[in-house]
Amino acid sequence: MRWGSLFSKLGIVLAFSISGIPATFAATPQTTLTAPILPTQFAAWQMHGSPQISKDASIADPANAALLREYGFTDVESAKYSSDDGRTLAIRAARFTDASGAFGAYTFYLQPEMVREEIGDQGSSLDRRVLFYRGNVVVDATFSQMTAMSAASLRELAGRIPLPTGNASELPPILAFMPRHGYQTNTEKYAEGPLALNLIGSPLPDNLVDFSSNPEVVLGQYSLSSGTATLMLVEYPTPALAIAHLRSIDAAYQAAEPQPGVTAVEKVGPFYDKRSGPIVAILAGPLSENDAQNLLGAVHYEASVTWNENTYFDKKNNVANLLVNIILLCIIIGAISLAAGVAFGGLRVLTRRYFRGETDEAQFISLDLSEPPSSPSRTEAGRAGSHRNRHNCL
């Protein structure tokens, strides 16, 4: 009865404890901790007050909030800084889910008249405004007065921006296939959805690109001897999808009557396209046939094979390391054997020295294997006896 009452009390206490756990977790608000983007101080700049943090894209850019969300906008942080000489600096930093979204937003705000700056991953400036991106963050900084050290201070700021990890830090591979010859500076644009595509001057409408297939789009302006044109690359997940969409593009362009949503293709004038692997290249503009083919020929897809099988080249599976361990094991075993031999021999010498009599007779057993003295054989004894008898007879 005593044990039964004890278990019943423990059961009641445990029941109350378990029932109280959900209430405890429900009372604790769930918060998502994100690393701050802007530091309170960098170079000669000191932050005034607290930064303004928001997850609303309309706070970052009211006119292009939907576009920022298409690029993967997560949050924005704004702050004002001042220096000892009285200058001020206003910074707005928008963060995205990955570096691709940040690069796309950076190219959207980039203007051809801007000057390239070595700030962050890529930067540019115009008058007192500096625009750059670092990792998955786009920074828009406006100085009250520019000096020779303004770019250096922003480089220090870029070095203190938290970076994403894993695949989120990688740029789209399609950027590597854009030709460099004839490219006009600051005209590269990257799109991840239909909103961006319709705002960056695409020669194709979004229904022909078909973002439901998860393509990546990049375009740029090129100036050649025969004119200026727009080169657009669309990379699909597989070559089969690229073939199907290229057929749709050719059919829409060659249609006798313009179709709804295809009028943009009819207005661009000379139109050239090709496929290279999963990439569809579109060239639109008043170029000669030779220049168009040369520019399209520079777009060449090369598949990169990545071997991601574990090679087990670590400390546990390295043959050289195994041999070293074997040698060390042999040395250790030899040292133990030598120490044991010295200890045993020394112990025997000590026992012989101090317990000589007892040790030799009592502890050690020896076999006497020496041959006893030989006795004369029977034949020789008989011969000796006959000789004695003969001598007696005589």
Image: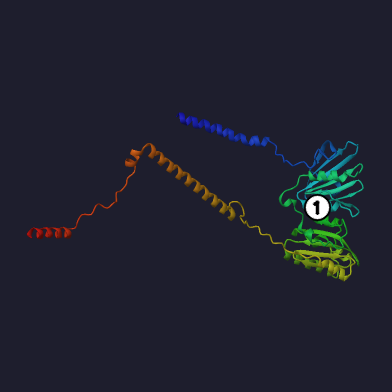
Q: Residue at x 29, y 49 (%)?
A: 368
Can residue 252 be seen at all in this image of the molecule? no
- Check the image and report above or below for 81 versus 311: above
Q: Residue at x 49, y 30 (%)?
A: 6
Q: Residue at x 15, y 60 (%)?
A: 383
State the residue position of label 1: 103
Can residue 305 be seen at all in this image of the molecule? yes
Question: Which quadrant holds residue 250?
Answer: bottom right
Tell me if 393 is positioned left or right of 201 in this view: left
Q: Nearer the viewer, residue 133 or 191?
A: 133
Where disc 1 sits, the SS reads helix
x, y (%) of residue 86? 91, 36
x, y (%) of residue 234? 79, 61
Q: Residue at x 61, y 52 (%)?
A: 314
Q: Quadrant of the C terminus?
A: bottom left
Q: Nearer the viewer, residue 291 or 102?
A: 291
| Amino acid type, callout 1 | Phe
Question: Which quadrant holds residue 75?
Answer: top right
Q: Quadrant of the N terminus?
A: top left
Q: Nearer the viewer, residue 316 or 352?
A: 352
- Check the image and report above or below for 383 versus 94: below
x, y (%) of residue 191? 81, 56
Q: How many marks?
A: 1
